Every structure is written in C-alpha cells, then in structure tokens.
Image (cartoon, grey):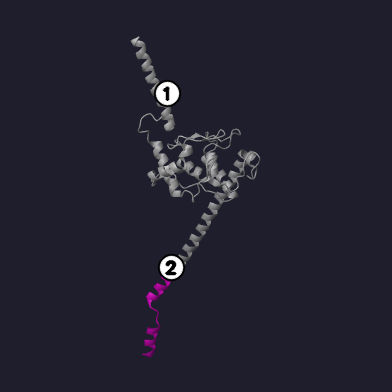
Amino acid sequence: MFNSTKSKKGRRSPLATVSLIVVGLMTTGGAYALFSSTASADDNVSTVASTSQSQVNEGQKLFASNCATCHGLSAQGTSQGPSLIGVGAASVDFQVGTGRMPMAAQGPQAEEKPTQFTNDQIDAMAAYVASLGPGPAVPSSSLTDGKDADTAAGAELFRINCAMCHNVAGAGGALTEGKYAPKLTDVSGKHIYEAMLTGPQNMPVFNDLNITPQQKADIISYLKYVQDNASPGGFGLGALGPVAEGLFIWIFGLGAVVAMTVWLTAKSN
C-alpha cells in the first residue's frame, strides 16, 4: 500500500513533458532568430560600406580624369583651381550637375551649360570629395521640392536676401567685372538649395544659421511659384523691373505720341 502511493506521487505528469518540449523549442527558435537577424544586419552594414567605398573609388577615378588638372590629384588645389577639401558633396553636385564644371576655359565666371556626366557619375564624384573632409551634404528632396512650404514667407525672404542681385522675379542681373547673377526661372529646387548652402561664384553662403532649412524651402517654393505662373500684368518685358518698364514707356509710348503729332501736323499742312 505504501509503495503504491509513493509511486503515484513520484510519477511525472504528461503536461510537464510537453511543457519542457515547448520551452526547448522556443529557446532554440529564439536563439536562431537572434543569430539570423544579427548576421543579416552585419551583412547589410557590410554591403552598404562596400557600395559606399566602391562609389568613392569610382568618383576618385572620374576626378583624376576630369578635375585633377585644375584642382590637383588629391583635390588640394593648384594655381588654376581652388582646393576642394571640405567643400562637401553639395558643392560638387551643384557645380557639376549644372554643367559649370569642368570649365571650358578660364573666365570671370563659370557659365551654366549641359552637363557632361550622368547622375551616377556626379554622385560618385560628390561622394569622393565628401570623403576628403566634412562639408555640406546634398539636401533631401523634402526640402527642395517646393511642397509643404510657405510661399509668402519665401517671397519676403527672397526680396530681402536675393532680389538685389537676382531681381525680384529671379530674372537675374549684371554684376561687376564681367560677372552676373544668373536667372532662376529654370533652375531645379535642389540646385537652388545647394547654391544657398555653398555660395558659388559671387554668391554669399547662407548657412543654416543665416537662413534655416525650412526658410530655404520657403524660398524654393516662391521661385517655383514664379516659374509656374505667368505674369498677371500681360507682357512681362523679361521681368527686368521698373527700369525696363520705364524705358519701354519713354521709347515706345512717347515715340508713338511724337509720331502721331508729326503725322497730324503734316496732314494739316
């Protein structure tokens, strides 16, 4: 009797066995998932690093073939061109992406022309120059597409900071020593942002302390509005402002009055 009772108390329940199996499977599965995710993350990091380095290497080759003559093999600068160490990817993207670089010939200002490189090649050269030293990066599309921005605030900022050179309608204007402020009526939002960020040619640098990223986006929104909307007053005269309009009135308006006066006098005689 005593032995039978002891045997029943010491017997393991079937549920205990099932529980142990479940715990074992969960532990094994969790360990495998953790190992797999860690390995996958390491692979992704390695892939990104490899891609980035290959892009830098490709950019270095392109730079040596197309830019080193003026800027030096290590971008340290020469008597023909400035150092590019620390100018950042944004400067390269602007200068090469607008065709200003490479320059066809030395002159007072690099002129915009059709680009000689593909977008991938421009990105590679920008990555190489960015690897030489810290500098402004290429802005995100959320800041350059002209959306989700205050157009009215951008118009005010543009009038205060930019209109004295580029004209209030972005039509451009002449500067000293053969230089000029280019028109902005067909420039992409990305290149407008990069120009403010890097200050090409005679343009001052508007860093994030002078004009915040959101304010830059507002200015781009205003310029996009000007690009997409024709002059509501009719013939815009190139959007050159009151001087051009005044000359038009003096030359053509008064000229028409004088011509009419001469005609009436001749007819009466």
Residue 196 percent location from the top left of the image: 49, 44
Residue drawn at the location 45% of the way across and 46% of the way down: 216
Query: In the rendered image of this protein, does residue 147 appear above or below residue 6?
Result: above
Residue 33 percent location from the top left of the image: 46, 62
Mark 1 belongs to which amino acid?
A: Ile
User: In this view of the protein, which residue sits in the foreground, 187 or 158?
Assistant: 158
Q: Residue furthest bottom?
A: 2
Mark 2 belongs to which amino acid?
A: Met
Determine whether, in the image, residue 44 is placed left or right of residue 226.
right
Q: Main secondary structure of the magenta part?
A: helix
Query: In the rendered image of this protein, does residue 73 appear above or below residue 259?
Result: below
Span of residues in magenta: 1-26
Res. 145 visible in picture: no
Mark 2 to mark 1 CA distance (whole Å): 90 Å
* Mark nearer the N terminus (2 vs 1): 2
Label disc, if present, on residue 26 of the rendered structure: 2
Q: Is residue 139 inside the magenta stretch?
A: no
Label disc, if present, on residue 251 of the rendered structure: 1
